[in-house]
Image (spheres, rainbow, N blue to C red):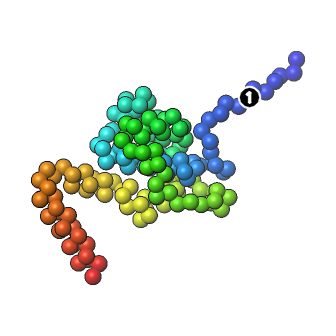
Amino acid sequence: MASRSKARRAGPRRRRGGGSHPIDVHVGARIRLRRTLLGLSQERLGELIGLTFQQVQKYERGSNRVGASRLYDLSRVLDVPMSFFFEDMVEEAPAKQGKRKASEDRAEFDGGKAPIAKRETLELVRAYYRIDDTSVRQRVFDLIKTMSAASAA
């Protein structure tokens, strides 16, 4: 009998040459951004949507693509519209992107183009909103604006 080849099981879609697709990396970074702003751990987010923290981690790295139904679940748990995950995305034609690794895509996202995604920024925003007194919070805001204007001059 001739042996029949088994059909390949579909896994996460990869770009030619390996690496994650930039859109998957971007969506993952937006998931991480919102999760961090809400003060949720990967484990807690996983519990809320019925996943392990490892799966959340893979989504955030962009190594696994987030399906539409899962994106819907994430938008509800993270209290954002589905469009949030695609905001600030730079549009490039896939053919012009060339071969890049997921780490290169993450480095570009983290480096200057999206300062809101940096851990330092996230921690600053979370600390800022933990200030209960609105007048104190406003003075901190004014101080930061003054300092940044002075350093720019």
* Image coords of residue 48 (percent x, y): 37, 31
* Image coords of residue 113 (percent x, y): 44, 64
* Image coords of residue 149 (percent x, y): 25, 76
Residue that appears at 60% across and 39% down: 12
Observer able to see residue 52? no
Residue that appears at 20% across and 73% down: 146
Could you tell whether 104 is left or right of 127 in the image? right
Q: Amino acid at mark 1?
A: Ala
Could you tell whether 153 is left or right of 57 in the image? left
Could you tell whether 92 is left or right of 138 in the image? right
Residue extending farthest bottom? 153
- Which quadrant is the C terminus positioned in? bottom left
Q: Nearer the viewer, residue 89 or 153?
A: 89
Observer able to see residue 131? yes
Residue that appears at 43% across and 49% down: 84
Numbered-mark total = 1
- Which quadrant is the N terminus positioned in? top right
* Image coords of residue 20 (percent x, y): 57, 48
* Badge 1 density bin: few <14, some 14–19, many ≥20, Cα 10 Å: few
Residue that appears at 49% across and 51% down: 86
SS of the residue at dot 1? loop
Residue extending farthest top? 1
Above or below residue 119? Residue 70 is: above
* Mark 1 lies on residue: 7
Above or below residue 33? Residue 110 is: below
